[in-house]
């Protein structure tokens, strides 16, 4: 499986930057809010056309024929929040033949999310857990996560993402976040994004070894923020 995004360069498309998602790896898309992360993630999932460049899955564009191989977890609820959690799990079971309902129930129980509760009554962190569980319980080749668990503290967020995907290494994960604290323990590769274009693409080990700084420190220097 080869999943890649080909960016045209800023110099009238004379050069191209290729963002390749490693099979079995975790790619972090790092940028402050408003930098084009969500559009890029929707483009990865085949729900939007990129403003420039192209997404290729095994050399082919994302279409209805291969979109099912990508599981997208947006940063907002994408179902009726007046429904009960269990009803949404059953809905996903009916919509996606690759959805593992038993695993979803097990994970929700582990994280203390009751299937009897209405989604609107859940805390924001529990609603984020629900979105992540629904997306991760599909059997996909690529999981695209837009700002997962943004309301969790750094350690709990990274622990949750690591736990949920710990038993799957025959797939790829793409995570967009504006909070890179501690993510060097999660990401294999990173792309720093600016206005939808790459500012820096690197594997994490090389980047940290070369600069002698954490991803959070590099993020602050790249974007001039703390």
Image (cartoon, grey):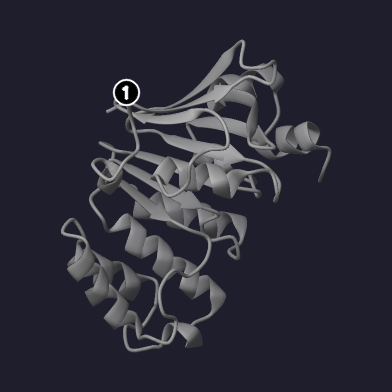
Camera-side residue: 66 or 209?
66
Q: Residue at x 33, y 33 (%)?
A: 24
User: In the image, residue 223 lies at what x, y percent?
Assistant: 78, 37
Is residue 199 rendered to the left or right of residue 159? right
Q: Secondary structure at mark 1?
A: loop
User: In the image, residue 20 lies at what x, y percent?
Assistant: 44, 25
Q: Residue at x 60, y 65 (%)?
A: 151
Q: Which residue is mark 1?
A: 59
Is residue 68 rendered to the left or right of residue 17? left
Relative to residue 49, is residue 60 depicted above or below?
A: above
Mark 1 nearby-residue class (10 Å; few <14, some 14–19, many ≥20): few
Q: Residue at x 33, y 64 (%)?
A: 134
User: In the image, residue 67 lies at what x, y percent?
Assistant: 30, 45
Q: Which picture quadrant has residue 208?
A: top right
Residue furthest to the left: 97
Camera-side residue: 122 or 207?
122
Relative to residue 74, is residue 106 depicted above or below?
A: below
Which quadrant holds the N terminus?
top left
Relative to residue 90, is residue 73 depicted above or below?
A: above
Q: Which picture quadrant has residue 138?
A: bottom left
Q: Which picture quadrant has residue 152?
A: bottom right
């Amino acid at each position: 499986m080869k999943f890649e995004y080909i960016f045209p360069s800023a110099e009238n498309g004379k050069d191209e930057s290729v963002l390749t998602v490693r099979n079995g790896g975790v790619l972090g898309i790092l940028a402050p809010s408003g930098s084009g992360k969500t559009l890029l993630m929707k483009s990865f999932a085949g729900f939007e056309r990129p403003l420039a460049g192209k997404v290729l899955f095994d050399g082919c564009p994302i279409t209805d024929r291969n979109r099912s191989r990508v599981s997208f977890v947006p940063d907002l609820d994408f179902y009726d929040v007046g429904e009960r959690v269990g009803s949404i799990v059953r809905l996903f079971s009916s919509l996606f033949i690759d959805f593992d309902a038993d695993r979803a129930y097990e994970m929700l129980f582990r994280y203390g999310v009751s299937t009897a509760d209405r989604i609107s009554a859940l805390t924001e962190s529990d609603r984020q857990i629900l979105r992540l569980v629904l997306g991760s319980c599909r059997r996909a080749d690529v999981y695209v996560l837009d700002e997962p668990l943004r309301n969790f503290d750094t350690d709990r967020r990274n622990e949750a993402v690591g736990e949920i995907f710990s038993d799957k290494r025959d797939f790829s994960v793409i995570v967009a976040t504006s909070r890179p604290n501690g993510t060097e323990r999660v990401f294999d590769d990173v792309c720093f994004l600016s206005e939808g274009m790459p500012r820096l693409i690197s594997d994490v080990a090389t980047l940290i070894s070369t600069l002698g700084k954490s991803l959070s420190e590099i993020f602050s220097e790249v974007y001039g923020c703390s």
